[in-house]
Image (spheres, rainbow, N blue to C red):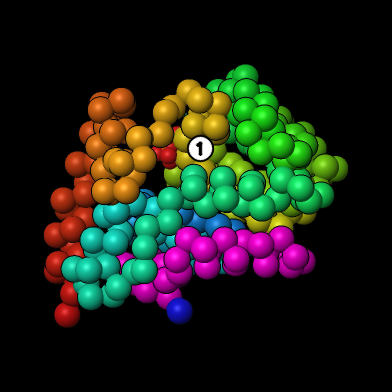
Amino acid sequence: MKTNILEVPFDNLTKEEALTKLLEFLDSNKNNLLVTPNPEIVMEANGDKELLKILSEADLVVPDGIGIILAGKIMKNKIKERVAGCDLIFSLFDKMKDTDKTVYLLGAEPGVAEIAKSNMEEKYKNLKIVGVHNGYFDEKEEELIIKEIQDLKPDILLVGLGCPKQEKWIYKNKDRLPVKISAGIGGGIDTMAGKVKRAPKIFQKIGLEWLHRLILEPRRIFRVKKIPLFLIRCFKARS
Ligand code: UDP
């Protein structure tokens, strides 16, 4: 069942249920799109029809960010719990590590995805990251990347180009990508590489991960400042 937050239809699932769904996708025979919108992305989608269409057509839409849970409360469209995209991917890695399922990482600055691969393969022993590429490429290189993905046929493609670039890239190429799950993971490759530290568990638990990130990356104020407007819109939209 879907829960609408300012036109973006979220799947109302717990983290465990979302993980089960991803495991089902791994056994399907199509490219399933996972998106993890936070309030900034919902706001962006309200002014970007193409992004809204992609989010609406995605196979799994999980609420990344405490702001979405708050919005659910305001609009009386309850959302079960926050499902941080990063946590979901790490839980998936944990489930996949002793199977023959494989991963491809696309994104971040040159050299970062290689470090991410080695960190993740160290942490999740036997995880198979079969290919990586940085996120700064031209059209000619893009064809080579797609060819490589077609040859390697990874089960999961994680794209970290920032939103909405990554969602639009996946959507544009989805029929040419022989994978079972495609997901935009923003700065997730930087996190895997240890370039960006996640907030301490206590911040994550009480819903203040965004504050920790803002302290580390003050330039994010330009994004975070949209959140009050997001909440005002949610108040206006409730009937
Ligand atoms: N990035 C990229 N190619 C681009 C633009 C951005 O690979 O053309 C990467 C950038 O290096 C960073 C990520 O995309 O690793 C964006 O991270 P950010 O935290 O800004 O994304 P968000 O999580 O907010 O979507």
Question: Percent from the top left, x then y, of residue 65?
Answer: 34, 51
**Residue 168 visible at all:** no
- Is 94 displayed left or right of 165 in the figure? right
Helix, strand or loop under label 1:
helix
Q: Is residue 13 above or below residue 220?
A: below
In the picture, residue 120 is in which quadrant? top right
* Residue at 75 percent of width and 65 percent of height: 27
Q: Is residue 7 above or below residue 220?
A: below
Question: Percent from the top left, x then y, of residue 7?
Answer: 34, 69
* Residue at 43 percent of width and 50 percent of height: 84
Q: Quadrant of the N terminus?
A: bottom left
**Residue 212 visible at all:** yes
In the picture, residue 233 is in which quadrant? bottom left
Q: Tell me where the magenta segment starts and ends, as one range.
A: 2-31
Task: Using the image as rendered, state which of residue 203 and residue 227 is in the foreground.
Answer: 203
Q: How many marks?
A: 1
Task: Using the image as rendered, state which of residue 48 and residue 211 is in the foreground.
Answer: 211
Q: Is mark 1 within 8 Å of ligand 1?
A: yes
Question: Percent from the top left, x then y, of residue 219?
Answer: 28, 27
Q: Which residue is mark 1?
A: 188
Q: Can residue 46 be found in the magenta stretch?
A: no
- Is 239 displayed left or right of 68 in the figure? left
- Is 193 displayed left or right of 156 in the figure? left
**What crowding class fits label 1: few (fewer than 14 Cα within 10 Å), some (14-19), or many (20 or more)?**
many
Q: Quadrant of the C terminus?
A: bottom left
Question: Percent from the top left, x then y, of residue 144?
Answer: 77, 34
